[in-house]
Structures are given as structure tokens and as C-alpha cells.
Image: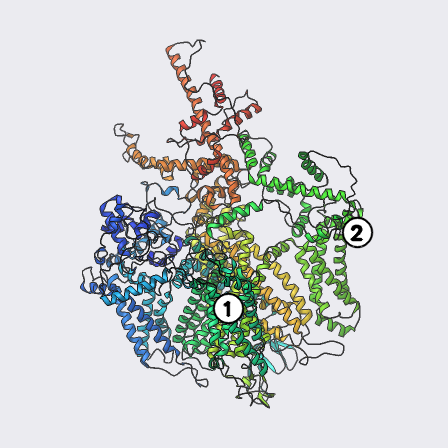
Amino acid sequence: MRYQDTGAVYSASLPGQSSASLISSQFRESGDTTDSTRDDDEAHLTSNMPSQGASAEWRGVDGLDAERAGASPRAKRRTVRYSASPLKKTGTTLKTVSRNLRRASLRVVNFGGLGLDEHVRLQDADEPYEKRDEDEDDMREEDEVLPDLTKTLPIRGRTLGCLGPHSRLRLAMYKFLIYPWTEPIILLLIILNGLVLTIQASRPHALPEDWPLDRPPPVRGYFHAWEDYALFALFCLFTLEAFARICVSGFLLDPEVPVSTLFQSPFSTYPDIARPPNTVAEASINIARTPSLTATHPPSQLHRGLSMTQRLKELRQNLARPFALSHHSLSMSQPSNTNAGKNTPSRARSDTVQSKSPMAEKALSGAQQMHSHMRNPSEPTFLSKALRSDNPSDALSLPFRLSVSDSRGQTKRNLPYLRHSWTRIDCVAIVSFWIAFVLATAGVERNEYHIGLFRAMSVLRTARLLAVTSGTTTIMRSLKTARPLLASVSYFVLFAMILFSIIGIQSFKGSFRRTCHILPTLGESEIALEQNCGGYIDPTTLQPVGYLNSNGENAAAKGFICPLGQICKENDSNPQADLESFDVIYYAALQVVIVSSANGWSGLMYQMMDAEFFVSCFFYIVCIIVLNFWLINLFVAVITNTFSAIRSDTKKSAFGAAPLAPVVDESEEGWSIVDGRRVAGRNRIREIYESIRWCWVAFALASLVLQATRTVDISPMHAEILDKGELALTITFDVEIVIRVLAYLPDWRKFFYRGQNVLDLLLAIGSSIIQIPAIHESKAYPWLTIFQLTRFYRVILEIPRMKPLLLAVFGNMYGLANMSLFLIEINLLAALFAVQLVGGDIKAGDLIDFGTLYNSFLAIYQVFSSENWTDVLYKAAVPEVPLRQSPIVVLFVAGWMFFANYIVLQMFIAVINENFDVAEESKRSRQASHYWASHRPQQVRAAWIRRLNPYRWFRAQPKAIEVELPSNLVLPMQKALVQDYSLPKRDNSFVDTNTRRSGASRQYTAKSTLRRLQRLFAGDITAGDVPLTTLRHTRRDSVATADPIDEETERHLEVLAALNNDAVDAEELNDALYERRAQKADFIRDHPSYDKTFWIFSQKNWLRRTCQKLVAPAGGDRIFGTPHSPIAHPIFQLLLLLTVIGGIVVESIATPVYRRNFYAEHGQIRGTWFDIAEGSFAIVLLSEFIIKVIADGFLFTPNAYIRSIWNVLDLFILVGILINATTGLIFIGGLSRLTRSLKALRALRLITLIDKMRSTFESLIISGIARILDAALLAILYMIPYAVWGLNIFAGVTNECNDDQVSGISDCINEYSTGYVNDGNSFTYLVPRVWDNPAPSTQFSFDSFRQSLLILFEIVSLEGWIDVLGVATSVTGEGQQPQTNASVGNSIFFLIYNLLGGVVIFTLFVSIIIGNFTSKTGSALLTQAQREWIDLQKLIKRQRPSKRPKVRPTMAIRQWCYDRAVHKHGWWHRMMTVLYTLHVIALMTQTFTPQPFLDEFRNDFFIFTTVVYVVDILVRLFGLGWSSYSANGWNIFDIIVAGGSLFTTLIVRFNTGGFVIQQLQKLFITSIAFKLVQRVNSLNKLFKTAVGSLPVILSLLGLWVILFLFFAILFVEVFSLTKWTTGESRNQNYSSMAKALVMLAFMTTGEGWNQYMHDFALDYPRCTINADGETDCGSIYWSFSLFIAWNLLSMYIFANLFTGVVVESFYYVFQMSGGSKSITREEMRAFKKVWAEFANPKTGYLERTNFVRFFGKLSGIFEVRIYPAEYSIHRIMAYAKDPQNRHSLPDKLVEGYDFNKVDAILSGLDRASIKRRKNLYNRLYHEARISHEPGKGISFTNMLLLLAHHKLIVDREALVLKDLVVRTETNKLVTDLVDFDRVQSLLLMILYRRRYIAQREQARMQQMGMVQSDIPAIVVDDFPATPPMITRDITSPGQTPVHRFGDGDTPSVISPGILQSPDMTFVVDTPSRSPLQRRQRMSEVSMLSIDMSSRLDGSMSRDSRSGDEDIMSSMQNSMWNDMMLEAAEEDGE
């Protein structure tokens, strides 16, 4: 009986899902559905997303749950504060139960389980409140005594199968858990657990550096220190706590669900139950915009059986049935109004479960007063504002408040133990501890093999400490909200990684095993080197031979060739204990993860290039682009968009549950405004201070400059000046603080209301304290100088544009602090986990050894920063290989890198991005402002050219005679004049695009190439949108004969165009344009020589006209000149493009190395081929310049050359190329590096030549460069004080000796022996000892401000900061040799710098670039609903109609094939999906080690898969036919892949193919895996969404390639001949273009760029300069300039542009909400199937004659039929069929049909719903009728968009203003047509009625034998005799509108047959009427249009207006009489 169906359903009247609900039901169904609503919304981030009510069967005896009823906001506000239930009128019982439930949920210190948004603070007694809104009943009810909790919510059900609600044990446990001190004590125990673990992990665990064995000593037993005993005791208590919770609430099943349900058959049939939703999103599964109309009627009684899908769904429900939660467990989680705390009376808190002694009450009273003052001080202090929390009246949120209340609420709700996230984690930790205890006691945990996983997982008990504040809790809940989307993106990225891993195995397995070996020379054994290779020099033949494989055979030579004396052979293992390899899938996957992290990948790439071929680099580069730049950025998109959606929906930050308060612009530096209120009173001291305030800013700058002058060898005098100067400045700032305090007198307390005052006071106090001699002379003083340096922030605030940017970055300080705290906490948790996992297994001696907790923290933070994270990975994993624990360690480190780098780090972007977001409430007003501004004519001109134009000062010399014209004729004549001078006709571009394309393809086939060239160089010249003013003309011209049905529609379109704002604005813009051009024409006529180039060539000169045909003008069209030729101009541009490409090719060949060898071979000669080529290219570009200048002039002409920014860039490039070519011809080999490097400018011509590159460069770079430069300046300003701080701390203490054995500088003398191979033990040589700056990867120091600033700039990119950290933590003192980890505390300096610099500053660049994108595209101002609509449009526009045959084939075998092809869920389709999955698994089983049987089986399986694949293609091809089959791109992919795979696999299988065939076979069989993308819905959706950003990404890539070419040429010309040092190798240099491009590619990701910068800064005497000027030196200036420029441009800007592009293009987040989530693949397939049935197969359009049938067949989300399918006639008749086929009229049995059943069914119809559906159908039909293209129909995409407007969105919310204006006019037109159709139907009804009556009368007369005489009959009519003597046409918009139709009870029925009747027109036509007369009739009837002001509302609310009385009342004001006369005439006929 528990599951008995009571027939209850979710209430349809409850509010629907929020538009920003981010968690779709499909994720909840597929994911973890065991959580309750409370668990998924613990912090109530979706607090204003109301959920639906629970069903009755879950309510039990408690009745209706008021918390789940759709109460009004006011009612919710009352009920939350112990007020009366909003349902009090429904009955006393329900009211009482509802009130009790609400009170119980908010009983003891908010232990009701409510989250942050619902946290109700019991107001203090002195707080005011209002009672106006409450009636007396409410107040009387609120005064009632609260009931006891145990009576309101008793324990229920049965737990553990034996503990019932009256069990003594269970009651005892319940009392124990609800005891007020229980939860705080448990929390203290968790904190104690964390402390014990911290103390335990702080002891050194690392093995000694000289430990001889490969594994640590075994350890037996668990108890070895006091911490072990403490942990044992703690976990005993935790176990008891868990047991108590399980006893009270159950373990897994709800207490009210019997255990026996687990053993019931899942195939049994149970009555349907409406289970309460598990999640908020699941509770609001209905469509947010327009609920499905089929959901409003009761369940159909016509059910005739279950389909297989329904049976599977029922099976799934039966399996999940025992795990459903009772309603009691969910009743506490209803979101309530966040403003509940306002205007409600306060009450004294009463506790029924605890008593207080007088002492305790007094202490508590004092604490409450203190807390109350902190929350509501009399005046808001800085602290109260900075620590704002979730409730505006609750300023300070107590730590762990939510955690305690959550645990208590969980107990109160009897939520089972494993149905809550935190308790699941607790369970894992407790179970893991006892497993670890057993293993340790048995001596298994740390014996021969180690099992540290369980001990590590026991640390997770402390994870609850992450909820230390409400802010960190909110962050976790925000992450949980984003979890489904993050998981979906993770699966997609994982699939891509698997594909790359498979490609890696196939291409590179065994490659890392090959290294060079030094052959024995002095009797020692063979020495293996780390150099990878592919061959060696044969000592006999001196020719390269291939490497020796494991069988001792020579393979083909490739890659690096080992020199003489070495041999290349295959080793038994790979580097890093086999972890670094592509030999098996898991190692290959690890390498792909490393590459995708963009850190540590360049070393792998160069190793592979040495082992294989140079082209191997493409695998890594493509992997980086696809994974790191593209797919990984999807995580940024999800995080930023999801958190933004949470923010816009909850009106709270996603990082702190804090309300989003607007920033107050403080005037006068904040001295006059405090929290928006003006502070009264000013005194003289304040006025004096404000006038001299800048002096202290100058003192702050002086303080920094003074300390920046410090150097390592500072003189005593200089040191004394520094000390005395700082003392004087400190006193000065102390005086300033005193003055500022006095300035606030008499109310000095207001001094503390501003944060800047408090900060300056703290800095002044700190700076004064450190001047105390004892502190000043201590070692801590350099660290404490931070107090003095922080004053520099005042200087930053004075720099223009820095203050708003600083406020934007740190404005959300609360969110930023929460995010930083969360980061530190989660790093500490991971560090504890790592210590327990690998502690004691790793040898000491390196920076990272996991020996202590802090060392582990540094390792975890290093992985978070991703810098050299592979060092940590291998350091931890390699020692675990013999201990069999390396897989767990690798998974942990790689998983942490993935989570920390791709999710946590991106959350910082979201924090900063949150500050750049426009407030949701102001978006629409901003949209209106932008819309208005964009529709005003804007004049842009080069002001400086205009000012310098000499013709402005010359007297006009017109040749024409002035004639005064009337003002109203000026503009028309100007237009005519301008048009006479070849103005391009704009109307030509407004022809229908499709028509023009088809005509053009027929007429100009030969010119298609030229058109493509024109598009390439000049962009698209076709108009994108068709203005409404030309819509009517286009429609008329595009059809041969006018359709009578369209004539009224044409008239309405005229009106629509006339009233449309776009058309009016376009006309205004055209007028302004014409007027401007006319003024320019007047100026030219007044100054005839102004339009002569060089005062020689006029517009009639043949040379100038010829030049004008070749080039396009600058600054607009030529007024009097010749337009550029559509033929000559593209050809000339193509010549220029080929010239530029030729120049790049020549440079790629004639590199400095080539030129040096050429001159060495041919001598120093002039006129070399490359010099001649350079000169030729320069001449071509010079000729272009001359042609442009002759055509349009250079400076002072209407279209001067200099007026275009692109021409200015061209001129700059041309000058550089001319200098390079000239010096190359004069001086052999060129003049200098500078002149030779100028040839790189030619690559930039590709930007100015190609239109797409111009637009991309302008939109992505130029438009946002100012904000990017602001961010760069802020970063530099941040580094400056930090550089001084580093100078103070580390100056002179980081130096070291190159011999590690010395103790300090005194011993660093003479020489020592070292070696390069065999750890320095073989082939040793003597080296002099040197005491110098450290150089772990690049040389650096903090010895001066310049050096300190340089190294900090380098490591702000996170490159090399670990090396600097290692040096700093090894400092032992000045002049002492560093020792590893001797000064670990110094790492604090770099951790802070990295967090604020490397994280905040770097993410600021990303946020600014994302902001630039959103500003440029306008999406920054889009509301949630508008973004959802844009996403829905993208989704719709990606759809294509299926091309399947309209008719099923007749042949039996072809029918079978057809069914297999079209059934997307049939057994054949599922079988192929399984086969493809098995194919991917088979690909993953490939290994390097031969496995004969498995390899043979795998190869045979590949053949089998390929054959089945081919069979599948043949089946689908035969079933569909070629035309339908080839229409799908996936099918073409199938043919290529299947054919190629079968062909190559058979060849390779029989060992007849060569290397190329083998590689092709690998490519083809791997490509089969892409079929899973097509077949798996989630992958397919993400793939299409990701591909949606592909065009912009390709444009960005093209621009990036040009930048690559430019810098590659620069680097090759400057550094090609530079001597190699430590970082360079055979491929890592700039000797050729290919190598330079690869170098630039990996430096883009920040890899080692600073090391190469220092290497190529090589200077004399470390290099050679020959007498003839040749040198192998580098250049300090060139090196620093080029490397830093590339780092900034590529790493900071272009790499982040990818992020911006992906975030902007990726709207997958919004597919989870709004209408998009309703359009599933199944819905689209059903729509396509109906479309294919009715659309014209030739044109692909749906013709108007098929509209009605098409609409009738639509189903699902697109259903628009008037009556639901369940109520169709055939279904009703089938249901009403009498089984006995009886006939009895009294029993309503007619011919075997039982009409009692028919009456029962029809009585269940919802009249209101049918009326709405009918109105929607009418509007949709008429809009489709006016939207179709005459002669063709309506397109697939337009029909989908049309249905979306009517079914999925609300226009007023979803459309931007521009589209809303157009949509409004369209809706007015549709309303006119609907109303007109109704009147017409009424008239026809009258007409046919008269005919019918006349026929009946005639028949009656004939029957009576009477003959009709000619005597006229007198007819009395009740219609008005005389219509009003006015006429109004819809084409007169100024007329007074007619009132609209009202709602009628009886909707008019429009028969589809009538609508399709061929003789049915808009009027009742007669043959005697002329077309002109008919048009007149139509005009008069058109005045039935409705009120303009109210039509939009009616169209959107979709009301039904069909009452006959209203129609008649409207007709009284119309000229209906003519139509009646016409009807009478017909009647008379």
C-alpha cells in the first residue's frame, strides 16, 4: 500500500523552473540521484528557483507541505518568520501542520538544515519592525507557544531492519545527536584530527639521501607515536558517531522504506508513483518558457500497452524504487525568500531542549550584544563592510555555522547516512582508517609492497574543514551546481585524449627506448646517455645506419644520428621507470595529459624529434592546439558562464553568498561620501589636507625610489642615507595620520569608516614599530619593509585608469579572499593526503621530497601552478614503482593537476570576471542606450588631416553658378547629383540572396574565381540582412504572377516596412550619408584642384582612371572617380599576395646560414638570386604604392592614401622592405642585423591584404588593446614594490659556488674535477671554481633593483619560478654555500607573489580579453533569457533537414535496408555503436611488447570491424539511395574511412604494404573511433558546440600564423648564427624557419622562454667576432626585446584570445536551460521526419498548401495541433468501440460505439487549454503564411525559428531590443490577419446560412406547390442601417486605432478545408469585380486591425479573441456593409 497511486500529479499552478537553472534533468538522471534536494542545494545558490510540489502519496498523514506550495513572496516572507501559513484558508489541520513544520525547521540555532540564503537571524530586541502588513490573526498566531521539536518531527520508520521508532537504542542515539553540544563537539574533534595529522606530518619522513636500497625499511604495527594513539581514539569516536547517525536515520534506504523492497522483482508492475524530486532542477523539469500544452490535460485514458522503451524505463524506476527518499527527508529544503528578515517582528528565542544557569545566561547575553553590534553597528565600519555575508543585516558570518546547522538538520530530517555528500565522505574516511589499521597491524601496509591509499583516504575526514566560512561553502556549492556540465566536458576532453593516446601508441611506441651509448674505450662498460636517437655512424663505412633493435637488427635510420664512438640501440626500459613512454595506453595517456597541460611538453617533443622525424612535432603542436587552446578552455567557459548564471539568478556572488552591492563612486577621494550618505560638516584642517594631499603621494613614491637604490655592494654612507631617509619618511606619514584623524573632528570615529584610512593607519603603525633599533637591526627587518613598500599603492591609485581597474580586480575582495582561502585549504588537504600516501618512500636531497607537510604543500602548490609539475610527478611516482604504488600516485598527481589547473585556477578568472559583469537589472537599459546610439549617424574623420588641409584656407573657385533652392529640394537634388556620379546603388544588394546566387551561378560561372578573390581581399559584398522596406518589392519581383491570396499580405508588409524602426533609421542614415557626400562634392567643385593628385592628374586623366580600376579607394567611395574594377582589382591583389608569399618563401630558403655557405662557395659577389628576388618584390610593392597615390592622392585629396590605417601600415612595411632591398644590393650580405631584419615586415602584408585577417586583427587586437595595456601596466606596477622587497631580502645571499663540495666563498678557489656523463664519474675534466649568481635554468639574482625586477617579470609567467624558489629556500647566509631546504620559510615570498602575480595578474589578462569579446559582440549586455535565445538560434541554425526518401521502398530487401538506416534506436544501430566501442577498446589494447596471439586476434578483429562497417554503409546506401545518403557529411566520412580502412588493412594484413600504407592504415582505423562522436548524444552535442567556435578559431589561427612568420623571420635573421649554449641543440635553435617556428610554438606556452632569452643575450668575450664582421655573438638588446615582445604578444594576448573565443562561442551552459534543453536529438529527428514527408524534395522548402497537414503531424515539443493527439477522432472512436458491437439508442450505443465513453472523454477536455492552443495555431499559421517565399515556400530553419518563437520562448524576455522592435511589428501584422480571418469566417457563415435558408425555403415552397412571385419581400434586419461615414485604412498609422476584440467564450473554428479552398480569398470575390475594386474592398476591411498599443501584449499572451459579440462590435466601426452587399449579390444569383 505504500506505493499506491492516489492519482496526484505535480501541481501545474506552481511556479516553473528558473530561466537560469543550470542542472538539467538528464544530468540528474544519469548522475547521482541519491542526494536529496537539501544536499544539492545546501548553500541554496538557486534559492529563487522555486521547485514544484511533492506528490500526495509521499505526504503521509502530515498532509500538504506548505513549504512546497506556490506561496507568494510576501507569504513566504511571513511564514519564514514563524508567521501563519499562506494556506490557512484551506483548513485548520493543514494550517497547523504547515506552521509546525516551518517552526521546527527553524528551531534551535537554525538547525533546520536551511542554507545560507535562508539562514534566518533571530532579530535583536531593539531592532525596528513594521506591522502594517500583518493582520490581527497573523499576530495572534505568532504569539503562540512553539511546540516541542520531538513532537513535531519524531523519528520515523525502521532503520537497519530492526530499529523501529520506539526502539530505546534509537531514541537514545537520537537524543544524543540533537543535544545542543553534540555537533560542536564533533566539529572540535574534526579540528583536533586535523591538528594531529598536521603535527604528525610535520616531522621529517624522507629517506636519507644516501639510502642504499630501492625501497624503505618495512614497518610493522600501527602504533609508533602518540599521534597514532590520538588518531585511533578519534576514529573510535567518529565510528560511534556514524553508528548513531545510521541508527537514527538509516544507512542507505529511507527509514520508511522496508528492506524487503530490495528483494522484490524489478520486473513486477507497480502503480505509478510521483516520487518527490531529488534535486531542485529535477523538481522544475517543466519548460521554463511555455509549458508543453500536452501537459495540461489529465492523463490519457487511451493507454493500450507499453513500448519497449517504456518497459525499460519502468524497469529502471523499479530498480530505483527502494532508494527513493520519503517526503519527510525533503521537507526542510524548500528555498525561501532571501529578504525574509526584513520588516518582521522580533521574538525572544526559547529553547525547549536546553536550560541555562544565570551565569551562563549573563555570559550569553554579553556575547549576543557583542555579536549584534558587530552585525549592526551604529555606523558601518570598514570591517563590517569587508566581511559582509549572505544576509544584508548579518555582517559577520561565524565560522562553521552552516556546517553545524547542516548536520543538525540532516538528523532532524532522518536523511539516510549515505544520502548526503559529507556523510558519504565521512564514511569513506572512517572505513579507510579501519582498513589501514588492519593492514598496519597485520604488517602488510608497509612491507615489501606499500598500500598507503587507505591511510591517505582517512585524511578526508578533515575535508569538512573546507566549510570554515559561508564563503568557502558557497564556492563548493557553486562547484556542485556546475558539476554536471564539468563532468560532461570532462568526458568530451577525455575522449579526445584517448584518441590522441591511440595515435601516440601507433606512431611512437618504443621510440623513447632508443638512446645513444658510448662505446667502451678504456675498458669500462658501455655508458648509456640520455640523448634519444634513430641511428648512428657506422665506424667502418662512416655512413649513417639505423638503430639496433632488441633483436640486434638494424632498423631504418631516422632522427638524431649518434656521432662516431657512440651507438644507437634500444634499451630494455623507457625513461623514468617506463612512465615516460607511448608503449601502452595508460603511459600514452599520461604523456597526452602532460602535453595538454602545456608544461613539460617541449622536452618530450624534442626527444621524439630526435628519436623519430622532425615532423613528429606536429603531433605535439596539434595536441596543444586542440586540447589546451581549444577543449581545455571549455572548462573556463563552463566555470565563468555557470558562475555568472548563478550570480544573475540569485543576485549574489557565487564566491561568497554576499549580496551584490553597487559600487559607490566616491567624490573627493571618498572624504565626502560614506556608504552613499554625505558626511555633514567640514573643518579647516580637512581643507588644508586636501590641498596638500599629493605631497604624501610623492613621499610614498620617494620611499620606494629610495629603497630601490640599494645594491649588493652598498657603501656605508649610502646605507646610512637609506636608514635616515626611511626614518624621516616614517615620521612624515605618522604626522599625516594625525592630521587625517584631526580632519574628522569632532566625529573622529568616522575616520575608521573608510578602508583606506584603516590601511594607512596600519601601515603607519607597522612602519613606526620596525624603526625600533632592536627590530631594525634584526634579520626580520628586510621582511618587515613590506609596511613601507605597501604605501606605493597610493601612487598606483593616482595613475590615470589604474584606479577603476584596481577596483575591478580587487573590488570583490570578499570573493577573492574566499577563493584564496579555499585554494589554500584544498592545497593543505591534498598535501596531507600526499604525505600519508608517499611520505617516507622518497629520498631527501631535492627541493621536493614529501618529507614534511610544508614540503608536500609546496609540491602540491607547484602542481597547481603547473610549472614543472612533471618533476613532482616523477619524483613521487618513480620510487613507488618497486613498491607497486605508482599507478595510484600517478592518478593522484595527474588528477590533482587536472582539477587544480583546469577548474580551481579558472575560478579565479570567474571571480575577476564577476567584477566586469554588468548588473542584470541594468542590462536592458544599457541595451536601449546602445540601440539608440547605434541608430544615430556618426561621423568619423581624420581630424589631424582635416586641420592640416590647406584647401580649408583657400578661397573657393567654383566653376558653377550659385542658384538658391528651396530647402525641401536640397537633399533630393543632392541625392540625384551623387547618384549621377556612379554612387553604388544600394538597392541592388538587397535582392534576395538565394535568388541572386542561383542567377549568378547560371550567368557568371566563369567569374566565380574572381568573386572568390574579391571576397578574399575585400570581404563579403552582399548584404547580410534584407531591410523590411524592400521586402515587398523583392517578393513581387521574385514571382512571375501575383497570387490573389498574397495581395492583402503585400499591403500589410508595406505597412510593416513603413512602421518599422529599422527602416526609418536606415532611411535617416542614408539621408545623412547622402548629405555628407553631397557636402564633399560641393567642396570638390568649389576647389577644383583638391581632387587632382599632385595637382596634375584629374579625374578624367586616362592614367588615373586606369590606376583607379586597379585599387580600392581609402576613406569611402570615390565621388567623381572611377570605381575599382571587379576584374582588374582582384587580379592585382592576387599579384600582390603572390609577391608577399614569394618573399616569405625566399627568406625561408635564403637564411643567414644558407647565405654564408653560398658566399663561401661562390665568393663575395653582388647580384645573387636572392638579392634580385628581394629587389623584385620591393619593386612590385613600390609600384602598388605609386598606383594608389596616382589613383587617389597621398595626403590632401578626398580619398587620400594616408586616410586608411591599413595604407599607413603598408607604407611602413614598404619603407622597411625598400631599406632592406637597397642595402642588400649595395652591401654584400646586407648592412647590419637591423636592416636584414626589416624583411620580416613583408609577412605583415598578409594582414592588410586579406580582409578576414584585417577584420580579425581589428576586432580582437585593436579594439581592446587599451584595456590590455592597462592590465600590463598594472602588472608592472605590482612588480615594482615586490622587486624592491626581494632586493631587501635576497640581495647578496643567493650566490653559490659551482662546486657543491665547498662550504662557502672562502673555499671556492682553485679547480675541481667534474664530468658530463655517468653522473660526472666518467670522462672527467678540471674546471675552475667560480662564486657567482645561481643559474639553475637561467642566471638571475636580486643584487640590484633592475635584476630583481627582471627575474620577477620572468617568473610572473610562472616559468622558472620553481628554480628561483629552490635557490631561495637553500640560502644559508651571505658568503655561505646553499644547502637544499635550509631556509624553507623564504618560500613564503614566492608563494604570495605567485598567488597575487602569477594567478591574479595572469587571470586578469584572460578576464579582460573575455570582457573585450563580450563587449565587442554585445553579449556583455545580454540577459539570461537573451543568451538562451541566442544559443537556441545557434542550435537551430546548425540543423539540416534529413534527405531520406519520402516514400518507403517497395522491394522487401530494400525495405529492410531502409528500416535499418532510418531507425536510430533499433537493434542494428545499437549493434554498430557497440561494435565501434569495441573497436576503440581494441585500439587501446595495442602495446609495444609483441603479444602474438593478441596481436593476431586484434588484426583479425580490425578486418571484421571494417567489413561490418562496409556492410553497414552498403545497407544504408541501398536503403536510402545515393541522393539521400550523400546528403549527410557523416556518410561521406564513412565511405572514405571504411573504404580506406578495408583496403589498407587487407594489404598490411598480408605483409605487402610499405611504410606509407602502414601509416595510412593506422590513420583510417583510428578515424573509425570518431563514429562514437556521431552516435553518443552528449559527445555529439558538445562536438557540434565546439565546432561552432571553429570559424573564429581558424581566423585567429590564421592571424597567429602571420605573427609566427613575422617573428620567425626576425629570429632567424638576428640569431641564426649565434653560438649555442646550454639550452640549444640540433633542433632547438633558429638556424632555419622550420626550427624557428617550432621554437616559437613551444615558447607560446611559456616553456623555457627566459632561458633562451639569456642564452641568446650572449656577448663578447664569450663569443667570437671576426675581422670581416662575421660573429657568432647574440645581442642583449635584440634578445630581451624580441623574447619579451613574443612572450607578451603570444603567451599573454594570443593564447588568451583562444580562451576568449571559446568562452564567447561556447553556449553549452545555456543549452541546459531555456528552450534549448527541450530540443533533444529525438525531438529533432521526429521533426525532420515530418518535414521530409511534406517538404518539396527539389527545393527543400515547405509549400503553403502543405502547412495544415504539416502542423497536424508535429509532435513533442513542436506540437501545435489544436486538440492533443490523445483526443483525435480515430483514437476516441477506437476507445469507444463496444466489444459486443451493440446498437441501442437509449443506452447511447450507436453502430457498435459507446457514446457514454465518448462523453466521458470529451468531458475531460480543458476548454481553456484548447482555446490557447487554437489561438496559437491561428497565429502560427498566419505568420507562416506571410513568412513563406512566393513560389518556393518556407525554409527548414525559418520554420524551426518560427516554432521556437511560439513554443519555446517569450519574445519580450528573450529578444534584444533591435529584434523585439521587428518582432513587435510582425506580431501586429499577424494579429491583423488573424482578426481579419475571423471576420471573414463570420461573414461566410452568414452567407452560407442565407443560402441554406433560401434553399430550404425554396424546397418548402416547391413541396407546397407554390410559385414564387416577383412581389418584393420586406426583411427586418437587426444590423445597423447606416455605417459610420468614415473610412480608416491600416496604411494610415496616424489614425485613431479601433479597440481590440475581447475574449469570447466560444472560439471560432477555422476549418483546414476552408483555409485550403482554392476559391477562398480574403474577400468574397465575384467575377464582376475588377482587381482595383477588389483592392479597394480589401483596404476597407483592413481597418479591422486592432489597437497598436495593446497588440504586442495580446500576441505574446496568446489570448483567444473569438467572441461573436466582440466581432460584431468591431464591425460597427467598419465598412462591412460592402461585403454584406457582395454577399447579397451572390445570394441573389
Q: Quadrant of residue 436?
A: bottom left
| Residue on which the image places disc 2 | 1094
Instruction: From the top left corner, tell me how far across and down residue 500 is, in percent.
Output: 51, 64
Instruction: From the top left corner, tell me how far across and down residue 79 is, in percent.
Output: 30, 50
**Residue 736 image label:** 1
Q: Quadrant of residue 257?
A: bottom left
Q: Is residue 2005 above or below residue 863?
A: above
Counting residues from the N terminus, which is met first, the one under dot 2 or under dot 1? 1
Mark 2 neighbour class, 10 Å CA radius: few under 14, some 14 to 19, many 20 or more: some
- Residue drawn at x 39%, y 53% is 26
Q: Amino acid at mark 2?
A: Phe
Between marks 2 and 1, how big is the CA–CA gap?
66 Å
Instruction: From the top left corner, tell me how far across and down residue 1954 is, in percent.
Output: 46, 29
**Residue 2 image label:** none
Mark 1 neighbour class, 10 Å CA radius: few under 14, some 14 to 19, many 20 or more: some
Instruction: From the top left corner, tell me how far across and down residue 394 is, in percent.
Output: 36, 59
Q: Are marks 2 and 1 in contact (CB under 8 Å)?
A: no
- Left or right of 1141? Residue 369 is left
Q: Is residue 211 above or below residue 618?
A: below
Q: Specify how the rendered protein is coloured.
A: rainbow
Q: Is residue 1924 above or below residue 1612?
A: above
- Left or right of 94? Residue 1220 is right
Q: Residue furthest front?
A: 684
Q: Amino acid at mark 1?
A: Glu
Asked whether 656 or 502 is in front, the reply is 656
